[in-house]
Amino acid sequence: MIRLIENIFEENGYNIRSLTSQEPIIFASDSKRSSYYLAIFLEGTTFDNTSVEHLNDYYDAIKGLEEGYEPQMDKNLSMLVCVKKTDTGSDPALNKMIFDIEEDPYLFKKYVLTYTNHQVEMALQKVNGLSVMSYLHSLLNNEVAFQEHKKTPNSESEYNLVSKLFIKLPFLDITTRNREIASLEDTITNSLSPDLLEIRDELLKLNIVTNEDAEGNIYSQTADEETLRTRLMDYIGLGGK
């Protein structure tokens, strides 16, 4: 999983450094975009005994870096907590814990990503030295895989993992394609089936929020990051995960 996460950050322009700790830690930074991520990797049993307060301690660790600390990190640091589980089945207690951690308002934004070794192995076999982002976008836009995921969202599939990666890492753009694709809109319109085009339109609608001003006029605006993330989670059946 560490290898997969490192490749995702690197292919999106982040600089990677490993930090010394009892558990593996990756610090990814992009100073130009003022975007910083601290990724930690925990076993499921360890995560079960982890508290929000313990995760918040990492904030002070970053501020105390002898090399690499930048003042803009204070308000632009996020944490990705990667939790290895033995299965992907529904777990109400785990879902509540994830919700409490991700909704904690203090210090920095936290995202919890659960996965299994089997999912990561399948993903790495498909990548096999190729671009990780090309693989992620190819799978995310695979109609058959998407329909199967909608039927069984908790199955131990590649799509289950990849869809969560796009939810937990907001800098990943669900509309991005490989550079050799000249026109995203034309490609989608000309190559996708009517059913998938309908799904595309539904996803685009998730990014639009309709409001009413004080004079009763209706207007639309782009959804903020948290609203879009919540809508995406609900849409693909991962609400609360």
Image: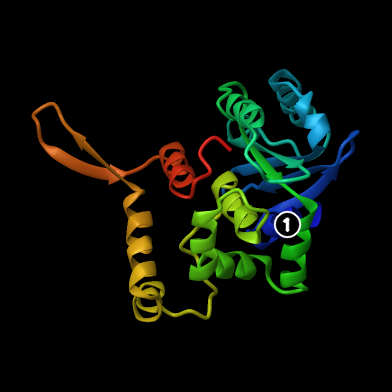
Q: Quadrant of residue 12?
A: bottom right
Q: Quadrant of residue 136?
A: bottom right
Task: Name the side, left or right, on which 100 lies relative to 20.
Answer: left
**Considering the image in quadrants, where does the C terminus appear?**
top right
Question: Which kind of residue does numbered mark 1 sit on?
Answer: Gln
Task: Name the side, left or right, on which 122 lies relative to 140.
Answer: right
- The x, y position of residue 147, in whole percent, is 48, 62
Q: Dot 1, crowdedness within 10 Å: few (<14), some or many (≥20)?
A: some
Q: Is residue 234 above or below residue 7?
A: above
- The x, y position of residue 105, in whole percent, is 56, 22
Does residue 142 appear in the picture of this structure? no
Q: Is residue 222 above or below residue 124?
A: above
In the picture of the structure, the residue carrying the numbered disc 1 is 119
Q: Residue at x 8, y 29 (%)?
A: 215
Q: Residue at x 79, y 61 (%)?
A: 121
- The x, y position of residue 145, in whole percent, is 55, 66
Task: Name the side, left or right, on which 59 lies relative to 102.
Answer: right
- Pick the front one: 201 or 118: 118
Q: Residue at x 10, y 36 (%)?
A: 217
Total labels drawn: 1
Q: Residue at x 68, y 58 (%)?
A: 8
Does residue 120 appear in the picture of this structure? yes
Q: Secondary structure at mark 1?
A: helix
- Pick the front one: 232 or 215: 232
- The x, y position of residue 206, in whole percent, is 35, 48
Name the colouring of the figure. rainbow
